[in-house]
Amino acid sequence: MSFFRVFFAVVALFAATVLNAQPQANQVKVSSTGNIVSPFVVNIWPQIPFVRGKDLCQYHDAYGRTKSDQMAEMTHTIRDLLREGVDSRNMLALLNAMDGQVNQQRSVAGSSPGMDIMLAGSLKASLDKVYRDRNPQIRRFVFFNTKPLNELLREMRAPQTQVVWDPKFIKSLSGVAYGTYSYAPSCKGDLLVTVHVDLSCGNTYHFQAQGFPEQVMQNIGVQIFETFHQTQFPSKLKIGTKQLELVGAPGTGVSVAPTPRSAEMACKAIQARLPTEEEYEYLSNVGDWNGGVTCSRNKLWAMTNNMVMAPDLRNPSPVRPVAEFPGQVFSYYCVR
């Protein structure tokens, strides 16, 4: 049984187990708008199978140019060879040898095994690096080891043995991840990689990046981190003894308005209000990856009474009248 068949056997067992299981404490919650609601932790099956797709390099090489373009290139090559003194009787054999050499190099590079293993390992390493660099309070995307350590070590020593899946461990999972890769159309040694994450709640997430094999997963690691850690609206956050609900702007999270007054009216329309200076500051300190909203530099934030919070202008106070910023737009979100 191939690894990919085993993986989908796990997926089928996982789906059946989730349907029959009671809701778990760490089960992903989804808002009425389809967004993930914080806080949550996603436990993902630790093995990520990758399947090689169509070789886009060879496809574009064959179909990316018209037949007349290909003939013109071949004619130019023949003309150059004749100019260099190549015997015309050996011309066809020489061209075939050159073309065969290129195809042989591509075949050797593409037939060597292990690209799927390298991509899976690179994804985990890249994701760990993002977590170390940004250091959120809670790790919300976890590759969950579903078995005791002694069983994992035994399977590593005998990877070809049949695996017996325990439904008790499958119940603890939130989803699975898998991917595809293909050689990119640029024909410069880079890959086009997609990663899919399917959760038991029904949500699916898809990530794509292009780059050299040893680097492409860095981009996808950042995408996964930001997707599962960015602040969702609506969500609740405790400030001191009170609980603040981040409602967001109408129809979105953080939005912009032509004046603080129009932002204030938009918040009132959804029974909410603009944040105070203290709330803006606190949520900015919490940060985008822990349930807050960073007051980005070079942005102006709308406040009530036609006032503006300018994080770059601290002296004597970041709170300024709107008259100091003619022709500017103002970022805002609503709270209650």
Image (cartoon, rainbow, N blue to C red):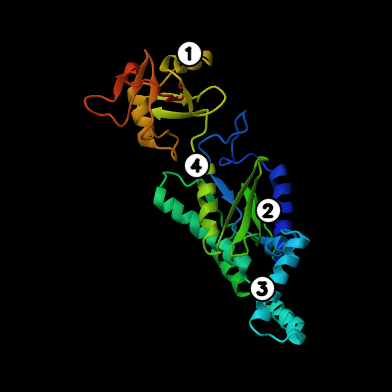
Mark 2: which amino acid? Pro
CA distance separating discs 2 and 1: 53 Å
Q: Nearer the viewer, mark 2 or mark 1?
A: 1
Residue linked to disc 3: 106
* Mark before the other along the chain sequence, 2 or 3: 3
Of the residues under marks 3 and 4, which one precedes in the sequence?
A: 3
Circles 2 and 1, Cβ within 8 Å, touching? The answer is: no
The structure residue drawn at horizontal position 25% and vertical position 29%, both measured from the top left corner, is 314
Element at badge 1? helix
Percent position of residue 148, x then y:
56, 61
Q: Earlier in the sequence, mark 4 or mark 1?
A: 4
Report the residue that reaches farthest toward the front.
Answer: 83
Query: First in sequence: mark 4 or mark 2?
Result: 2
> For residue 265, which numbered disc appears in the image?
1
Q: Position of residue 107 (x, y in %)?
A: 69, 75
- 307 or 74, which lies in front? 74
Q: Quadrant of the N terminus?
A: bottom right
From the image, state whether disc 2 or disc 3 is nearer to you. 3
Task: For marks 2 and 3, give the CA distance.
Answer: 43 Å
In space, the residues marked 4 and 1 are separated at their CA atoms by 30 Å
| N-term mark: 3 or 1 | 3
Q: Regarding mark 4 in the picture, which secondary structure is present there?
A: helix
Please tell me how crowded label 2 is: few (under 14), some (14-19), or many (20+) other residues with Cα within 10 Å. Answer: some
Residue type, mark 3 in image: Arg
Quadrant in which residue 326 is drawn: top left
